[in-house]
């Protein structure tokens, strides 16, 4: 489906063109007309499907029709990185619309500045629920209080991830500050009973859109590399030598392992950094910027840090440690092969991961290929990383 078929404003079409989008992705083809019709929407879709533009484009179209400079669009997102990413996408797609988008989240950004954001002629705010609720409740400065009286469209993005991060209560609280009359859009990669309850509370006779059944894009080839725990680092080195890995996120189970592995890759001469919860927000931002620009080849990350990251050129996702759930696996490998580009996912698996692999294969409805590297000495003694 071509974007001209949606009857979007010329200014919005020029944003789409500038981004180089030619045809709508399946979620865009389904969601955009429904949202333009004023319907509430529940979308079961992961990142990598084009869901940001699926809600951003009709949101921009709707806001162009009314008064500018009032906070009329509110998007709640789980992490700062995702909030930044959504805001950047909206500001690019809406570059010619005169509408302005800003972010609100905790960490180093100060309260006063954020009150100003909420009051200062911004049309769309992308917020993490915790800090937004703080601001609504008066935060650290009881003289200042933000309000959401003008909000016409609410988007809950990655609702399941927001719940995972403990934002359920803040979200329910924030709902009380919103006008009753509004359009609601909820996106989630999974539909647990918790999310279903939220959807029932928030959405009014929604159009339901389901994309890909949590399966990753079929642009990602997946390979399993069986290995003992002790030889993982050695095997990873061999894999990196054997494959044209241009740019990869390497996932580890813990922050400590991410840090250690990134240092080890650094000693081997690779441009790598860790990306985990112990890093300050500014360090995370710098690391992500360098990775995005190709100045870093490897980001060694934990799940919590990496969900929602949208970087186009990631050629590989490597699971140094397998994730806890099959859904997390699909999230991880969804970091590559985005928007029809080809990607590869390599997973180092130990015997203890076998059950997990079966549940992943069950979810994906296919068998994953295993690879033994002939020249690798699987009986060797491990080097200390
Ligand atoms: P998302 O699922 O929103 O995180 O989007 C994943 C990636 O797909 C982003 O890099 C978008 O810029 C890109 N994208 C979104 N829509 C399209 C489209 N219609 N054609 C090509 N790329 C797109």
Image (cartoon, rainbow, N blue to C red):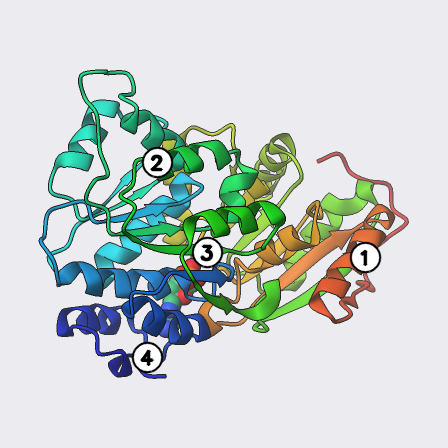
Task: State which mark lies toward you, 1 or 2.
Answer: 2
Q: List x then y, in percent, for residue 178.
A: 29, 41
Residue at the spot 68% in from the left edge and 66% down from the top edge: 222
Looking at the rendered structure, the secondary structure element under dot 1 is loop
Does residue 267 sit above or below 342 in this rendering? above
Residue at the spot 24% in from the left edge and 51% down from the top edge: 152
Of 187 and 88, which appears nearest the observer? 187
Residue at the spot 81% in from the left edge and 49% down from the top edge: 353
Q: Earlier in the sequence, mark 2 or mark 3?
A: 2
Q: Which residue is mark 3?
A: 187
Q: List x then y, in percent, for residue 137.
A: 30, 24
Measure how far apart labels 2 and 4 are at the Cα level. Answer: 39 Å
Q: Which residue is mark 1?
A: 376
Measure how far apart labels 1 and 3 are at the Cα level. Answer: 44 Å
Of 239 and 116, which appears nearest the observer? 116
Measure how far apart labels 4 and 3 are at the Cα level. Answer: 23 Å
Does residue 190 sit above or below 36 in this rendering? above
Measure how far apart labels 1 and 2 are at the Cα level. Answer: 59 Å
Q: Earlier in the sequence, mark 1 or mark 3?
A: 3
Q: Earlier in the sequence, mark 2 or mark 4?
A: 4
Residue at mark 4: C-beta within 8 A of ligand 1: yes
Q: Earlier in the sequence, mark 4 or mark 3?
A: 4
């Amino acid at each position: 489906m071509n974007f001209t078929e949606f009857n979007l404003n010329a200014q919005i079409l020029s944003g789409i063109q500038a981004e180089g989008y030619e045809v709508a992705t399946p979620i865009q083809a389904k969601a955009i007309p429904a949202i333009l019709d004023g319907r509430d929407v529940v979308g079961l879709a992961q990142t990598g499907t084009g869901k940001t533009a699926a809600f951003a484009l009709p949101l921009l179209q709707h806001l162009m029709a009314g008064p500018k400079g009032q906070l009329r669009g509110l998007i709640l997102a789980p992490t700062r990185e995702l909030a930044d990413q959504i805001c950047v996408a909206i500001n690019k797609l809406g570059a010619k619309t005169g509408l302005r988008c800003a972010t609100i989240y905790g960490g180093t950004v100060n309260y006063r500045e954020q009150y100003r954001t909420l009051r200062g002629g911004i049309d769309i705010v992308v917020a993490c629920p915790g800090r937004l609720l703080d601001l609504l409740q008066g935060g650290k400065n009881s003289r200042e209080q933000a309000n959401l009286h003008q909000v016409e469209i609410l988007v809950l993005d990655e609702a399941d991830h927001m719940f995972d991060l403990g934002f359920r209560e803040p979200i329910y609280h924030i709902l009380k500050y919103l006008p009753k009359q509004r359009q609601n859009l909820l996106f989630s990669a999974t539909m647990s009973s918790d999310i279903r309850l939220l959807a029932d509370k928030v959405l009014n006779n929604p159009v339901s859109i389901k994309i890909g059944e949590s399966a990753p894009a079929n642009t990602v080839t997946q390979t399993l590399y069986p290995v003992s725990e002790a030889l993982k680092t050695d095997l990873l080195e061999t894999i990196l030598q054997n494959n044209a890995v241009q740019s990869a996120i390497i996932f580890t189970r813990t922050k400590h392992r991410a840090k250690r592995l990134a240092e080890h890759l650094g000693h081997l001469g690779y441009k790598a950094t860790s990306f985990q919860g112990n890093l300050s927000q500014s360090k995370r931002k710098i690391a992500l910027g360098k990775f995005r620009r190709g100045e870093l080849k490897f980001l060694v990350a934990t799940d919590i840090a990496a969900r929602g990251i949208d970087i186009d050129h990631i050629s590989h996702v490597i699971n140094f440690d397998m994730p806890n759930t099959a859904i997390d696996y699909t999230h991880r490998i969804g970091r590559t092969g985005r928007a029809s580009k080809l990607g590869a996912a390599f997973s180092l698996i130990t015997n203890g991961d076998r059950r997990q692999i079966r549940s992943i294969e069950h979810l994906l409805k296919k068998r994953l290929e295993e690879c033994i590297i002939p020249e690798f000495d699987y009986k060797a003694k491990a080097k200390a990383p």
